[in-house]
Amino acid sequence: MRILLILLILAFLNSCSFDNKTGIWSGDKDKIKTKEIKKKLKNVIISNKVNVDQIPLSKKKFVKLPKVKKNLIWGDPFLNTNNYYTNLFFTEKEDYSVSKKLTNKKIEKDILFKNEKLIFKDIKGTIYIYSTNDNSLTKFNFYKKKYKNYKLRTYFTTQDNLIFISDNMGYVYCLDMNSGKLKWAKFFEIPFMSNIKAVKKNLFLTNENNDILVLDTNSGEKKWNFSTDKTLFKSDFINNILVFENNLLLLNTNGSTYSINFITRQLNWIVNFKNFLKTDTSNIFNGKHLVSDKKNILISSDNFLSLHDINSGLRFWDLNIENNLNPILSKDLIFLYDNEFNLIAIDSSSGNLFWKKNFNQIKNDNLLSSMKKKKIGVLKDIKLINDKLFLITNKSNLIEINPFTGEVMNFKILPSDINSNIIVVKGKILYLDKKNRLFEIG
């Protein structure tokens, strides 16, 4: 076992593009030398797994949430450039409208809403642009029948009136949101495997080799690229990136987090989480998306949670705790849902436990007595809305939880089953149901 671990670490080091001859930049004259990389590298070895009951209780009595904010657009699957969901405003009215059936195809979960248009895609790569003003539907398929038997995986985001899409065949292309027509397309040969961010005429994305590419949003031409450590094992984890001010941050498939100033093209810091290097190769790194509140960055996987200073990479604390859903970073509190069905609030300043509540306890709450347990379903998502935690289940239930105590406050039953992610725009909850109809609640 010890020999295998050493071999894995050697493979990891050999795969890094940190040689003195070439540097790790490509596409310009800038180079970063090996010594500079080693100075910035910070290895984090997460402690042994802890039971939730072993986490010390927080001594804080009063904590704050961010102010409730009326969100006007949802132009990115993670809402914004720093993946921060904030405290969303919802009218909580029970009024709703429903569209016609928008497609018979099997859709992907992510939906966007911008300029009064719903943007979504199906598993065959068709992009749909539905106008809520005139109920018109525009469709565009870049692939036609040429790749009908290929298992596509696409990623998208928006900027201004443009939609950017990348895929696992190595293509990146741009659509005009108003006309639904192709503006440009580029082929980079290596499959892409990350979310996309568009900031200041820069399009950021990574490929399956963990290389960061920066493209011009107007033309799709490559400006520069940056090689991070190569993947050791094939992983289902999708590289996750966020942009904060002039800094690009990447959590890659090796569990390494990079911070790069994309204006100066200088490396700020690297943190590597070594605990995923296990002797059992089935235990590969399985990360969650990065979250930043403009001061801290929350880095997590299915078995750890770690809070860092966004400017220096300095680690404040870590917990080796299993995460079942992407955690929410919300000023003084972090909310997560573990594999033991515990809904947990963590004090972000100390990493200590603020409260925990098992989902089965929530199901048994008196306020939910009108529903049978089977009708409540399985927890699929958590959002902070109107100073409350909204638990979203696969049975179209919204359970409202007091974020300071974990107590059930109320519940809502949506008018139709959910078939997409839920987004909150202009005080309304939006989602596509199982018949692919757009529901607007509120």
Image (tube, rainbow, N blue to C red):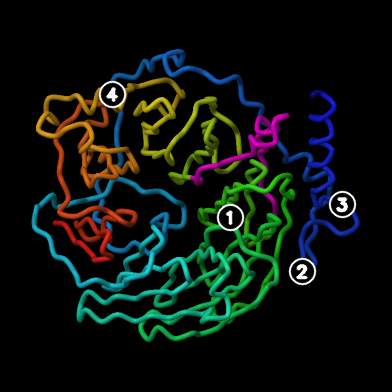
115 horizontally vs 53: left or right: left
Q: Amino acid at mark 3?
A: Asp
What's the CA distance linking mark 2 and mark 3?
Answer: 16 Å
374 left or right of 213 in image = left
Circle 3 crowding by C-alpha within 10 Å: few under 14, some 14–19, many from 20: few
Q: Earlier in the sequence, mark 4 or mark 3?
A: 3
Q: Mark 4 touching mark 1, by CB under 8 A? A: no
Q: Position of residue 5 (x, y in %)?
A: 79, 29
| CA separation in Å, label 2 and label 4 | 51 Å
* Label number found at residue 62: 4
Q: Amino acid at mark 1?
A: Leu
Q: Give the residue number, with chain letter if any, for mark 1.
A: 248
Q: Which mark is residue 19?
A: 3
**SS type, badge 2:** loop
Horizontally, is 76 left or right of 315 in the view?
left
Whole-Å distance between the Cαs marked 4 and 3?
50 Å
x, y percentage for residue 53? 42, 14
Instruction: Give whichever of discs 2 and 4 has the lower sequence position.
Output: 2
Magenta residues (range):
266-290
Q: CA distance from mark 2 to mark 1?
A: 18 Å
Query: Does the rendering let one see residue 344?
Result: no
Query: Observer-nearest residue: 83 or 287?
Result: 287
In the picture shown, does residue 201 fall above or below 346?
below
Among numbered discs 2 and 1, the one appearing first in the sequence: 2
Residue drawn 44% across the image and 76% down it = 162
Q: Which mark is residue 256?
A: none
